[in-house]
Image (spheres, grey):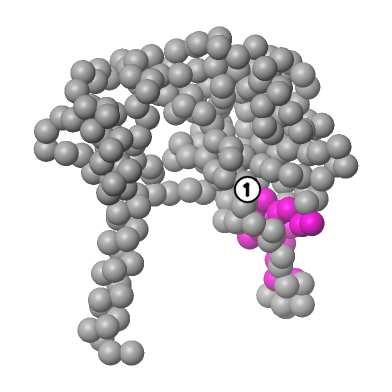
Amino acid sequence: MKPKLLFSLFLLLNLSCYARSTTFKPDTQITAEQGKKLYAKEHILYPRSSIKGYKKKFDNCSFTNQYTLTQRLKMYPYSKAIKVMIVSYFGGGMPNQEIRLDSDTPAKKQLTYKQKQHYEGLVIKHKKLDYSTLIETKVLNRHQIDVLTNILFNYEYTGMRDYTLTGEAACFDPRNSVIFFDKNGKIFDHLDICFSCHRSDSASGKLNVGTECAQKFDMLTKFFIKAGIRYGSDKAVPLN
């Protein structure tokens, strides 16, 4: 391949990555409605701070109490889940795909247990969880599910709740997941969380941490630590 063509491809890849991960802020402030229309037309993300009337305090979390526990348990995925588990694992894997390692590869056979964990990350094969790659696990009881869903569903922005478009951090290296099992004991979805970069993703694309108000990830961090899942959530525990 010619050097000029290689350089052009390099620029194209880097610019596309920049466009996906960068928040574009206009020179002048806009209204929330203008921001939404521009996003729909040009797919440009405008931060909340660019909207007229914005105040930093609007980003704080406010408890709404709009959903009771009964209502929350009727929402996906809790309406389908018979068991909810939170876990931790080393990064480096691909948590939203079924990961299959080629066991015939000599180099992979020689990996130590910890190296295997680090290489694979979260492993789900045929909708079943591979516990050998996990560091910590905790099956949530009803009270803990109440606390978790309260954090996810009942905390909104203090102000400007109708405008949430913003940019995302480019990194995503999750070490923790909330895993949902159906009545047959099979995994039907999982929410993967990267506490270090404040991002989340899910296997189905239907799940996230809800409104990402300023204290949302701090609340989730405390929840995971209190439940005994410290790796990935507790900054005092070094990431290997």
Q: Residue at x 76, y 45 (%)?
A: 187
Q: Residue at x 52, y 40 (%)?
A: 200
Seen in the image, is 57 located left or right of residue 229? Answer: left
Residue 110 falls within the magenta-colored stretch: yes
- Residue 71, compared with residue 195, is above or below; it is above
List x then y, in percent, for residue 196: 47, 39
Q: Residue at x 26, y 35 (%)?
A: 35
Q: What's the magenta region? A: 108-126
Q: Is residue 13 visible?
A: yes
Residue at which label 1 appears:
203
Q: How many marks?
A: 1
Q: Is residue 22 visible?
A: no
- Circle 1 SS class: loop
Seen in the image, is 136 located left or right of residue 10? Answer: right
Residue 209 falls within the magenta-colored stretch: no
Q: Quadrant of residue 119?
A: bottom right
Seen in the image, is 97 located left or right of residue 80? Answer: left
- Residue 236, compared with residue 22, is above or below; it is above
- Residue 111, compared with residue 220, is above or below; it is below
Q: Residue at x 67, y 27 (%)?
A: 75
